[in-house]
Amino acid sequence: MHRFNQLSLRLMVLLMSLTLPASALAEAKLDEKINTTLKPLLDAVTSFVFTSFNIGGVGIPFVLAWLILAAIIFTLYFRFINLRAMGLGFKLIRGDFDDPDSVGEVSHFQALATALSGTVGLGNIAGVAIAVSLGGPGATFWMILAGLLGMSSKFIECTLGVKYRQENADGSVSGGPMYYLSKGLAERSDKLKGLGKVLAVMFAIFCIGGSFGGGNMFQANQSFLQLVTVTGGENSWFADKGWLFGLVVAAIVGMVIIGGIRSIAKVTSKLVPFMAVIYVLTGLIIILMNYSAVPAALVSIVSGAFSPEGIAGGFVGVLIQGIQRAAFSNEAGIGSAAIAHSAVKTNEPVTEGLVALYEPFIDTVVICTVTALVIIVTGSYGTGDVSGVALTSMAFESAISWFPIVLTVAVILFAFSTMISWSYYGLKAWGYLFGESKAASNTYKLMFLVFVVIGSSMQLGAVINFSDAMIFAMAFPNIIGLYFLLPVVKKELNAYWKKYKSGELVRQN
Amino acid sequence: MSNTILVGIDGSEGALRALDFAASQARLSNQGLTICYVIEWSPFTFNTPSENEERHRRREEELTRAHSDLIEPQLIRLAQSGVSAEGLVRHGHAATVLKDLGVEVGASSIVIGRKGTSRLASVMFGSVAGSLVQIADRPVTVVP
């Protein structure tokens, strides 16, 4: 307890030192100060994770090749499970084969919805805009393809997440890559025991980093940017008050994760799916309003995918943008979702994997594609140096002038729910390393809040690079483990598939 | 187990009247009672990760509390008046659970109380009695 007090004191001092200089002049410079102090550090981490190799003069980040190669191998190994199991996955989500004795436990639908609220976030709104502005319309094609392949990676992760989860004494469960990497590999063979442990610790460290980066700073940064955009851009009262926005958001997040105020999280968890539906429907309406531009948009997506014009890096450049933003948005192969999915109540781990197929599908193939199409059909792409959430906002605004306000609400809610989810992922990883005591948890939670303020105050470039770096770093230990554990999943799948095909599964209702 | 009347109860007075009515019917026809309390729950809700993590424990708590606070006192009361009864707690949508449970225990009929909510309220939120009468495959008695 003593150690915790000291730590939290230090964190409080850090928070105060970021916020105390309250004179107007200092206020304006504060955002800048945070930016210049941390930028070199974050850039160093980024360049390490995105070490590239050259093909035909274009640098390909190793981690992206690593992710997409794994997704292709997994898809082939499980003979296109991503497509052939979608029917069964849907039946499972509907609850067709639920065990009647576990009514009242976490259902497949609930586990999927919770995981989705962690992935549907600014990646779908801002990330896609970044992909299209850097890679052209063709990036959409590779994004969709990466989303479809990512379904296989997600299937494996979530099956393993449930299979090797740890059931705590109080009946709660802790699951995720930390557990399948350590327990799963140890089970495969004694020789792998040490490796499993190392991978699990690596994953936990990167996951904590990811929870501060993509799961936090990126969300805070982009939602702040959107707020500034709708309140008048550079002239907005908010323009140089990122730290203030950060403090307010940190206070609300803190009320939920430290104060344990359930009502805020409850309201958000109900509003987020509603906002997601509004977002997708509005997107579809805008696409329909511009129906005459749709065929040309589709042509530009396909032709731009293979022979892009005026894109840095040409074909490979587009490919990279598409894959990178898809992976950042749906997190397939990253391992994060396995933590959320492992709460489901089921005796068949593979069922949760089959349900999880829908996560990259909804996230990337549906929502990201809608964003991309809106940007392309409204002609907003290529009209200036606008990128990120501002580009998406501009595209929606060109069709429905007041929509940026709705978008701002949606963006802040998405950001908030993603932060809540990621704070949970990070906390689980932290708990794996330092134990799940109250002092340890609170230390993590305080750090998480500090990063909300930092993320709101910094410029997009540094934040997005660091966010990418940390989230993608998780893929290294995770996917190594997945390769070793493929036979385990295959055995589970075959047994379950046989039961399904023979009609042995009892259909409820 | 075909000699039983299924009674759906909650904490309300209407439920007590329904239970008393069912008990007198059971005595007259020499049947037993199955009393059930349904905890409103849907598998299609949106939760936070920590809600999901704690769900198992909360479910256990809900079951224990419903048994001790609602079911047990009634079982004792029924035993004193010489009616043999069994108590159950289930999660789900009340009308659907009672309908399915009627089949499961082979109840001769289902007895429930009604809340007497206004027409507007039942249009907005639905009424358990109304839905049960519509979907049940055996006689339903609604006690006012």
Image (cartoon, grey):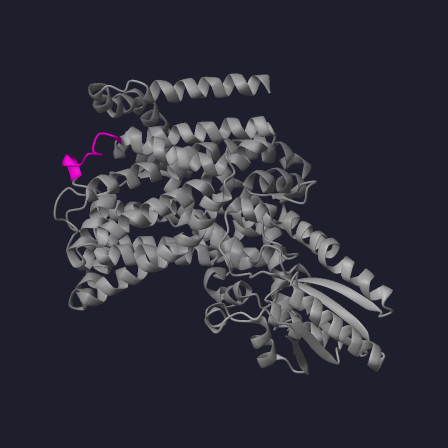
Is the C terminus of chain A in the top left, top right, bottom left or bottom right quadrant?
A: bottom right
Position of residue A439 in the picture relative to residue A291 (left or right): right
> What is the chief secondary structure element of the magenta stretch?
loop
Visible in this render: residue A77?
Answer: no
Position of residue A380 in the picture relative to residue A413 (left or right): left
Q: Is residue A236 magenta?
A: yes
Residue B15 higher or lower than A345, as above or below: below
Give the residue displayed 54% in from the left and 31% down from the top.
A430
Residue A359, how many percent across, how many down? 44, 55
Foreground residue, A107 or A237? A237
Residue A450, how many percent across, how many down? 40, 27
Give the residue displayed 15% in from the left and 35% down from the top.
A234
Displayed quadrant of residue A172: top right
Position of residue A248 in the picture relative to residue B92 (left or right): left
Is the N terminus of chain A in the top left, top right, bottom left or bottom right quadrant?
A: top right
Residue A151, how many percent across, how many down? 45, 55
Give the residue displayed 64% in from the left and 49% down from the top.
B58
Q: Which residues are magenta?
A: A233-241
Foreground residue, A149 or A440? A440
How many numbered tags mark residues here? 0
Give the residue displayed 74% in from the left and 74% down from the top.
B21
Q: Is residue A397 magenta?
A: no
Foreground residue, B80 or B43? B80
Visible in this render: residue A158?
Answer: yes
Residue A426, how many percent across, how many down? 49, 36
Residue A8 higher or lower than A49, as above or below: above
Residue A53 higher or lower than A122, as above or below: above
